[in-house]
Each structure stands twice: as C-alpha cells, then as structure tokens.
Amino acid sequence: MSDAPPLLGGRYRLGRRLGKGGMSEVFRGVDTKLERPVAVKVFRSNADRTSRQRFSDEARLLARLSHPGLVTVHDAGSGGEDGEPYLVMQLVEGRTLTDVLKGGVLTPDQVVELGRRLAWVLGYVHQNGIVHRDVKPSNVLITDDGQVFLADFGISLLVDKVGRMTETGIVMGSAHYMAPEQVRDEDFGFPADIYALGLVLLEALTGRTEYDGTKAEAAVARLVRAPNIPEDLPDPLAATLRAMM
C-alpha cells in the first residue's frame, strides 16, 4: 500500500504551504492529470458560514475575470476529510511586495512602474463592477522577471452589492490600508481601492506603513492627519499620490 496522502479531488497533490490567511491556506500543488504545478487554496473547515460564502464568492469572481495581472483560476471543488472547498489557481513563482520591501525600498521610477501595472489591473476589475477592498502589499505578487499580479479577492464584492459591514457587524478590509469612508462606516466604492493603492505605493517609497499601530489606531489615524508624502518626491508622482489619497 502507498503511504502517500490521497489526492485532493482525486487529482491534486498538495506540497508545502505557501501562505495562510484568516479562512484559508494556500499550498503549492501538482495537477496530476495535466502534470503542471498549481497553487491550491484550501478553505478551513472550522470557519463560519459568512467566511464560507466569501470563499465561494471569490471562486466565482475570479472565474469570470481574465487579465494578465490576475491569477487565473483553473478549477474549484471540495474534498478532504471534512469536504473543505478548494480553489485551484495558476502558480505564481515570486514574492509578495511585503517580502520585496524587506530587502529595501523601491526607487521613484520603480514605484511609478508598479503603480502603472496595478492601476491597469484595478481598472479592469472596476470595469467589471468589482471593488477589491483589500489592496495591500501582501496581496501584490511580483515574479522574478517583473510581472505583477493582484491577488486575494476573498472579500471583494460586486459594486451593486457593496455594503459597509458584514452581517456580523465587522468592517471588512485591512485597517492599515482602509479608505476614510470605510473607517467611518460610510458607503464606499472604487475610490477605496485607489486610496489603498496610494498607501501601498507610498509604503514602497518609504519602507514603512503610513498608518501603523494597532488596528484601531491605524484606522483612526487617517481621520486625523493626511499621509506624509516625502517633500523631495518628484512630480508628477507626488501629485498623483496626493490625488489618490
């Protein structure tokens, strides 16, 4: 008898874990049918009903999108001992922007190029009526050859369904990158993603999170002061960042 673990969905062999989120884990895997490497996002069986719905929504959202800056969805299903839902995606070989910045800040020219690529992706997402709601460095993937991907649509919503909170009363998004209207529990839309992108680009320039501290401190700070944009930053980059935020 073989001691190898059973294939997920009778097809996918899971390898090392690549990442871990609040309601799922991402593994490097192999599609044994097509013999290609994949990334497999497996939903945690102990998550609540709302989290399960968000996972299902992510699968449907990504399946309807096709863009060079978005991770392609190959398959979805359920398996494992507890029948956990899973999402099979294109494997992006690279690092998150968070990891890239551990090696040092980007130059203004590099930030301009990064911003151009992410704005291109967000423009496509917005044209399809979707607000990402969680643009942050850990959701930006950069390959060794310079390709840029926007990942993790787990809390995205179609714009006609965007609300302020979940049914559990929790504001969705990462506190350090939320737009002021999200913090104030007001209606929000596409501009919230642009604001978050501005904070991401500013962090790439300075190497620090603009609004740091606890989640509550970071969220409230943007209501008290505007972001500190370096005085020596050249235009039009400085002006663009001010307009975004």
Image (spheres, grey):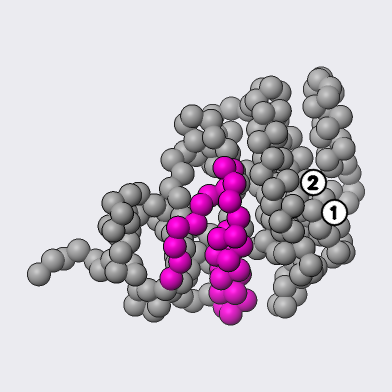
Which residue is found at the position 74% from the left and 59% from the top? Answer: 129
The quarter holding residue 60 reads bottom right
**Relative image position of residue 36 (x, y in whole percent):** 33, 49
Answer with left or right where residue 220 lies relative to residue 197. Answer: right
Q: How many marks?
A: 2
Q: Is residue 178 visible?
A: yes
In primary-sequence order, the first of circles 1 and 2 is 1
- Label 2 sits on a secondary structure element that is helix
Q: Which residue is mark 2?
A: 195
**Label 1 amino acid?**
Pro
Evaluate whether residue 203 shows in this view: no
Task: Report the residue at 86% width, 64% height from top.
Answer: 187
Q: CA distance from mark 1 to mark 2?
A: 9 Å
Under mark 2, the amino acid is Tyr
**Is the residue 192 above or below the residue 159 in the image?**
above
Residue 118: where, in percent of width, then height? 67, 40
In this view, the residue in front, 172 or 2, is 2
Q: Which residues are magenta?
A: 48-77
Left or right: where does residue 99 sit relative to residue 88? right
Left or right for 99, reference 27: right
Is 6 or 125 nearer to us in this picture? 125
For residue 98, above or below residue 75 = above
Residue at the (81%, 20%) spot, across then down: 234
The location of residue 64, given as percent across then percent down, is 60, 60
* Quadrant of res 152: bottom right
Q: Quadrant of the N terminus?
A: bottom left
Quarter of the image with the C terminus is: top right
73 left or right of 181 in image: left
Task: Please tell me whether mark 1 or mark 2 is closer to you in this view.
Answer: 2
Picture quadrant of residue 211: top right
Kindly identify which residue carries mark 1: 180
Contact, CB < 8 Å: mark 1 with mark 2? yes
